[in-house]
Amino acid sequence: MSKSLRTVFEMYVFAYVFLFSSRPVTDPDFWFHLKTGEYINQNGIIPRTELFSFTHYGKLWVAHGWLSGAIFYSIYSRLGLNFLIFLFAILSALAFWITLKRSNSHPFIGGLATVLGIWAVLPTIGVRPRVFTMLLASVFLALLNRYARQGEGRAVWWLVPLMGLWANLHGGFWIGLGLIILTIIGIPLDAWATGVQMRSLWPRLRTLGLVLFGCLLAPLLNPYGHRLYTFTLGVLLSPVFQGAVTDWLSPDFHESQVLPLALLILLTIAVLVFSPKRPRPSELLLFLATLYATLKAQRNLTIFVLVAVPLLADYLQSWLASTSFGKPLGKAPSSTSSRGAILLSMLLLLPLAVFVLKLKSTIYAAPTQEMTSLPVKAVEYLKEKQITGNTFTYPNIWGGYVLWALPSNPVYIDGRDVYAEDFVKEYLEVITGLRDWRGPFNHYGVQVVIVTTKSVLARELKDSSDWHEVFRDNLAVVFRRR
């Protein structure tokens, strides 16, 4: 393959990943991030106490990810929702372009691995703060890999300011610390496997140790100081949050959307086994650590994908090059260019036109109830009828949309982790019918309820003389206290 064709093919992969990454706003948490950003932009201060619920109003709130919310609202208020979708698709594509550049495989193999990778992470991306984590993790992996292989010391120091930025964007900054620690462990493992003298590694390990120390201090440069560490660690270790929040559950491989992840896992394991080139211990360590993290909590799958894609590409290349039919793929790209190669590469771009035509109708369209699975029509009804009051929602993530779209109605709970564990446990018992809802509703003064039509609460409230139904559609039903 000529270098010109390689370059244009990489552009083709970037465009394809960009179009895959262009997702409509379907994450319910987007709305409370937007509301937080609105408060920051309009008041010029970062919130330190709870503002939007009536159950926890005034209590300490560590709004980790506050900078993401501020960015969301700044762009939304000036350039609109569609530009946010466009920007985050670019950021996602950039993360995978960096990942593609970490591979030394044939462009076709690297491109296929990259497309499989973006396919695997589709359920977790979009206009979400975790896209910042995906991008920064991709940068961390690239810089750490280059330093581990080549020992270049200057670029690795960029990890310290990037960690400070990361900590203010998203609570996933812990991943950056983990990647540095795994690299520190992996360097001597590689040296042991190849017989390199351990004494020669100390300067490199010392530098990484200092970088790690700097990255431990950098997150303290945030509005909440050390509380950012203690609060996010508390959420990470909370059995209530891990058992109740879908993102903290293991992937369900019975779901069709998880099949690309399963395929990526199985293919990567297969090529690591069959490739004549043996993987380095550091590569196996990183692969197994991120695979375990993904199988434990599906929110970690983006980091695993960033690790697995270059491994799949490189070791698939090695295996194919050892076979008779795959030897052409093992050849280095030619330095010459040809009009035919350029024409072929341009033809590869033509299928993208089909995706571009669908962007306006499916991606850059106003969020609808059918697309978002949010009670859009119920909220419009409450706004139109000026029905206000303390509002209970089920599922809890509907609260994030209510506090943005209907600020006159403070919420009982939403998707933020500002709520106490005992309170969350009580909420779960209420919505599952394990606890009588009358006690909590009377204690907190619930006045409006928005729940799914087939929920236990919907049936019980309909039979209650204290509540009457004011709205119903195929998604949600609204009750108001008499």
Image (tube, rainbow, N blue to C red):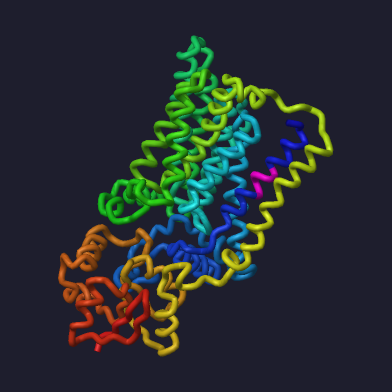
Q: Above or below — where is 413 with respect to 219?
A: below
Hey, which quadrant is residue 146 in on the image?
A: top right
| Quadrant (top left, top right, bottom left, bottom right) of the C terminus | bottom left
* Residue under the point 53% across and 13% down: 200
| Quadrant (top left, top right, bottom left, bottom right) of the N terminus | top right
Examine the structure image and report whether residue 463 is included in the region drawn in magenta: no
* Residue under the point 54% across and 22% down: 204
Q: Above or below — where is 389 with respect to 396?
A: below
Is residue 150 visible in the rendered image? The answer is: no
Measured as percent of width and height from the top left, residue 319 is found at: 54, 23
Measured as percent of width and height from the top left, residue 8 is found at: 73, 41
Does the magenta stretch mainly form a helix, a strand or a loop? helix
* Residue under the point 37% across and 65% down: 397
Is residue 172 visible in the rendered image? The answer is: yes
Q: How many marks?
A: 0
Q: Is residue 417 left or right of residue 184?
A: left
Q: Is residue 234 left or right of residue 149?
A: left
Q: Above or below — where is 107 with respect to 202?
A: below
Q: Above or below — where is 58 with respect to 248?
A: below
Stretch of the chain drawn in magenta: 11-15
Q: Is residue 439 left or right of residue 290?
A: left
Q: Nearer the viewer, residue 140 or 119?
A: 119
Q: Residue furthest front?
A: 325
* Residue under the point 50% across and 55% down: 129
Q: Is residue 422 left or right of residue 152?
A: left
Q: Nearer the viewer, residue 338 or 3?
A: 338
Measured as percent of width and height from the top left, residue 94 is found at: 62, 46
Q: Nearer the viewer, residue 124 or 54?
A: 124
Measured as percent of width and height from the top left, residue 237 is found at: 30, 46
